[in-house]
Amino acid sequence: MNPEQQKAVLTIALLAAFADGANDEREREEIRRLAESLGAAPGAPDVAGLYRDVLLKRAGLQEAAAALTEPGHRQLAYEMAVCVCDADGRATEAERGFLAGLAQALGLDAGVTAPLDRQGEAMAELAEAAAPAAAAGPVVAATPNVPEAELDRSILNYAILNGALELLPQSWASMAIIPLQMKMVYRIGKAHGYELDQGHIRELLATLGVGLTSQYLEQFGRKLLGGLLGKAAGGLGRQIGRAATGMAFSFATTYALGQVARRYYAGGRQMDGALLKDTFRNLLEPAKRMQEQYLPQIRQQADSLDMAKVMSLVRGQ
């Protein structure tokens, strides 16, 4: 995939991110930040410029679709758009309308789009399975009912798993990272006596700057620009070198998130938003360096993963 084709796919992904018009200021800021980060990679298109063009409605769906002439690239663009729309939950009516228009612009019939739509819905269901939709209310235990050392091991295992998912070219692999992070936070809260629901966990992630849509866009963008996504999902195999940046990002984000959550709930949820965010940022860079020592475990984990196993892990089976 050449730079112009990458630019077209990224434009479609960004258009999908804003299709429902529901992004709050924090999410917009995170998407702007990731656009600058992706655009800084050697040989990458001007992603920050694409972001501005999408916000100012200077980037058109028809123009982006016309730049993709190969059937595999068109299918990939649609698949990524489905994943972006489903990253923060089931697609809204506005997002479904966007996807219908995208399918038409790309010249894709229902035989191509229907399986991708079903896969997106399955992954949205997976996010819903990560934590209850609503909790009766927090029940605070006097002491954690899971030893802190065991919690640390669990956080590390989630980080290794999410790092391994970055080595897989399939779209479901990137979509599974967020539900696994939500599952991890849910279990950390429960270990400290808090029965969390999806709304609380999503709000915590947003406070830390780990937006659901923006995080998926970053994972997808790094895979695309790194050469892991150039065909319809599943066609490229594992390329450790090219995946290194994304692997470090997902490992570090998951590890830092887990450690912040552990401190937050162990301390009775007394940390304010600014302290939560600062703590997360301070943990992020050491966690990226830490990832290097666990590379053998990450590679071994990647060799054993498939969609059924990951879905089982999120559901806690």
Image (tube, helix red, strand yellow):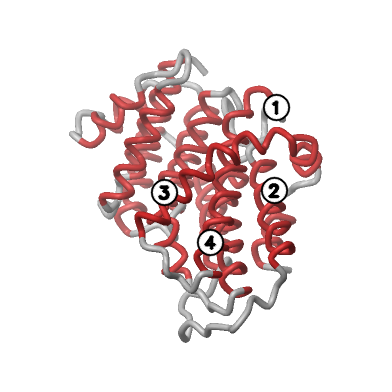
Whichever of labels 3 and 4 marks the residue nearer the N terminus, that label is 4
SS at mark 2 in the image: helix
Towards the viewer: 242 or 169: 242
Separation of marks 3 and 4 at Cα, in angstroms: 13 Å
Which marked residue is nearer to the observer: mark 3 or mark 4? 3
**Three-letter residue code for mark 4:** Ala
Residue 295 versus residue 4 in the image, above or below: below
**How dense is the environment of label 3, judged by Cα within 10 Å: few (below 14), some, or many (20 and up)?**
few
Residue 284 versus residue 188 in the image, above or below: above
| Number of the label disc, if any, that sits on residue 278 | 3
Residue that mark 4 sits on: 261
Residue 130 versus residue 81 in the image, above or below: below
| Number of the label disc, if any, that sits on residue 161 | 2
**Three-letter residue code for mark 2:** Leu
The image quadrant that residue 107 belongs to is top left
Residue that mark 1 sits on: 240
**Three-letter residue code for mark 3:** Asp
- Tell me the quadrant of the picture where the C terminus can be found: bottom right
Give the image location of residue 72, x and y in percent. Answer: 55, 28
Q: How many marks?
A: 4
Give the image location of residue 70, x and y in percent. Answer: 50, 22
